[in-house]
Image (cartoon, rainbow, N blue to C red):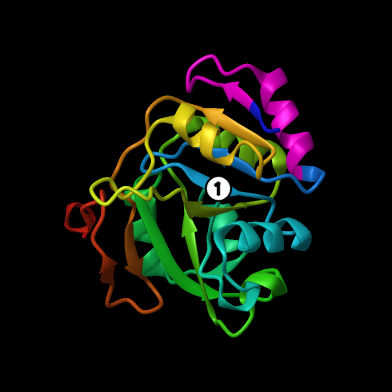
Amino acid sequence: MAEFIKLYEKGTDMRKIDQIISCLKDGGVIIYPTDTVYGMGCDIHNTRAVERICQIKGIKPNKNNFSFICYDLSHISDYAKVSNAAFKLMKKALPGPFTFVLDGNNKVPKVLAQGKKTVGVRVPDNEITRLIVKELGNPIITTSIRDEDDIVEYSTDPELIFEKFQNVVDIVIDGGFGNNIPSTIVDATSDDFEVIRQGLGELEEFL
């Protein structure tokens, strides 16, 4: 059964963060808050954990379309090719509710790169999740927690998320109610930036 851990963006309990980091290093799967919807994730370098998330989500590893969360822009450039124009845009827009699609490099784990040249990267405006990534030293996968409700697409209540996933993940982090609007996805593989999915972020504010 998963552990239910309450965390606050201000005055975060580092003992709880250390517990989460140990879980991730051991191949654990966690559910965590972002500045948009709640996400499910693991260390991107743990192949078994990535495969486990694919099993939970009911998809094949080579069909995954996962993005991952980085701590900051320098973290992003470790895994993706970032043009000067893309860097300037992301510097203004991040941390924030955007996923940027970029050309990946050879540091992207094979389990995530199968049949794909691009990666989706996020730096959410949420101190809990960014602190986890910073302390772990690696990005974590982000895949949204969806709801089966016909009206509400994404699960927002961490207690209800825990009830649903307590037997399939290792930790559910309660960071307060989540948003019901996902991130805006921006294709930044060229300097003709294109919004692939309009979400919470407004790209025009930063162009």
**Which stretch did the figure color magenta?**
4-24
Instruction: Report the quarter where the N terminus lies.
Output: top right
Extreme residue toward the right, this view: 26
Relative height, residue 75 to residue 100 (above, below): above
Task: Give whichever of 75, 167 is nearer the camera.
Answer: 167
Q: Is residue 6 left or right of residue 108?
A: left
Residue drawn at 20 percent across, 53 percent down: 202
Task: Give whichever of 170, 106 is nearer the camera.
Answer: 170
Task: Give whichever of 158, 15 is nearer the camera.
Answer: 158
Residue drawn at 62 percent across, 78 percent down: 62
Residue drawn at 45 percent across, 41 percent down: 38
Position of residue 178 measured from the top left corner of the image (x, y, whole percent): 37, 34
Q: In the figure, residue 104 lies in which quadrant?
A: bottom right
Instruction: Report the quarter where the C terminus lies.
Output: bottom left
Kind of residue at badge 1: Met
Q: Is residue 111 left or right of residue 63?
A: right
Q: Which residue is identified by label 1?
A: 40
Tell whether position 6 is magenta.
yes
Q: Is residue 8 left or right of residue 206?
A: right
Position of residue 156 measured from the top left corner of the image (x, y, whole percent): 37, 36
Label 1 secondary element: strand
